[in-house]
Amino acid sequence: MNRSSQIHDDPSITRRDCLRYLICGWGLAFGMPLSLSTVAEATSGSSILDKYLEEQLHYQIGYWLIGDVGDAKTGFLSTNMSGIYRLRLEGHGKGFINFLLGGVKYTYTSFCLYLPDQDRLLPVYFELEKRRGGKKSLRTVRFDYASGEIVFEVKSTAGETSTQKEPMKTDRIYEDYLTLFYNFRHGVYGSLESDRKFLLPLTTQKKMQPVTLQIADLEKENTFRSREFSKTGKHFFVQFKINPEDVSSGSGEIKGWLSLDAVPVKGLIEDVVFFGDLWGELKERRVATNPRQVPVPDEVKNLVNGMLE
């Protein structure tokens, strides 16, 4: 397997690019670090929509000796607004442990544009909702390309709201968790290879640093695989770190396995509040047979329409 890496020098995404893509084509990586101000070449073959639209991934969640304390699922759906798609990851507890915790549910949602010329997803609006019992907190990120700023808003369980704004740089790529998840799987940031490292752009908080994701070399990969009871589908062992608050973890450290076609088949989040190390394992991957469209919130419509004015 080729272990070399290349830096791609493609045009960056600017507000003018976004407007051009909307008008002309409406319809949402790892060696040497990739530049965060460039984008990879469009992948050949099936588009990102062909590969992932209507895909559903279902995971079982467990910790320590208890193998079933929750479920998680992802979804990639069309909306009732042309060129806009909704991505979602939902996770919730179940059983006696969840009862003791008062009911736990996390929902990550992204509304994004599809850029046909780049064959990638561009985030427009992202939110992370946390529920426990009757309490709810909400973090939102609005990618306002028309005004050239990102708006971060946090609503606490006590109902208090704080807002921060940051100017957008025209030579930077912006991703939320879900657009990055699909863009990376699609190969926008490069192909999967052993012993490769990527700097991945991620913006869910002001002044957030890029994520360093490392794929293990073959020796480490074989060592980790030998510890797995089931070795099916486990081709690449990855390690990375994200904002601890977004996963209720003390460290934000995540490690796990990807399949040959970049499907996350098993993962572990370290030091999760109430649990310790929490793991998830893929139980089902399927494509919905009854495609449906979901409504776009007015806030998202306003952001998109602002780009066309």
Image (cartoon, rainbow, N blue to C red):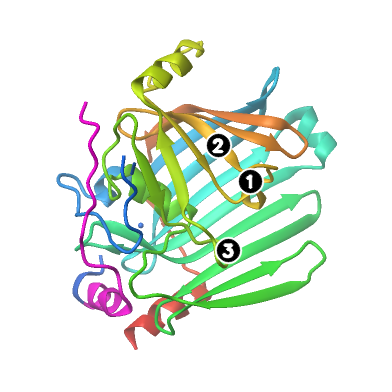
Q: CA distance from mark 1 to mark 3?
A: 14 Å
Q: Is residue 15 magenta?
A: yes
Amino acid type, residue under disc 2 in the picture: Ile
Reading the chain from its start, which is encountered first: label 2 or label 3?
3
Q: Please provide the residue range marked out in magenta.
A: 1-23
Left or right: 57 in relation to 5: right
Residue carrying label 3: 205
Q: Secondary structure at mark 1?
A: helix
For disc 3, the neighbor class at 10 Å (few under 14, some 14 to 19, many from 20) is many
Sequence-wise, the earlier of marks 1 and 3 is: 3
Give the x, y percent position of residue 171.
Answer: 33, 71
100 to 177, vertically: above or below: above
Crowding near the residue tagged with mark 1, few <14, some 14–19, many ≥20 C-alpha atoms within 10 Å:
some
Residue drawn at x 22%, y 50% as measured from the top left: 47
Q: x, y (%) of residue 244?
A: 64, 48
- Where is residue 243 drawn, in percent x and y? 60, 51
| Residue that label 2 marks | 254
Main secondary structure found in the magenta portion: loop
**Is residue 99 or residue 32 the one in the foreground?**
32
Which residue shows up at 19% across the image and 75% down it? 24
> Where is the C terminus found, in terms of image quarters?
bottom left
Residue occupying the far left of the picture: 44
Do the numbered discs 1 and 2 sit on residues whose CB atoms are within 8 Å?
yes
- Label 2 Cα neighbours within 10 Å, binned few <14 / some 14-19 / many ≥20: many
Q: Tag 3's secondary structure?
A: loop
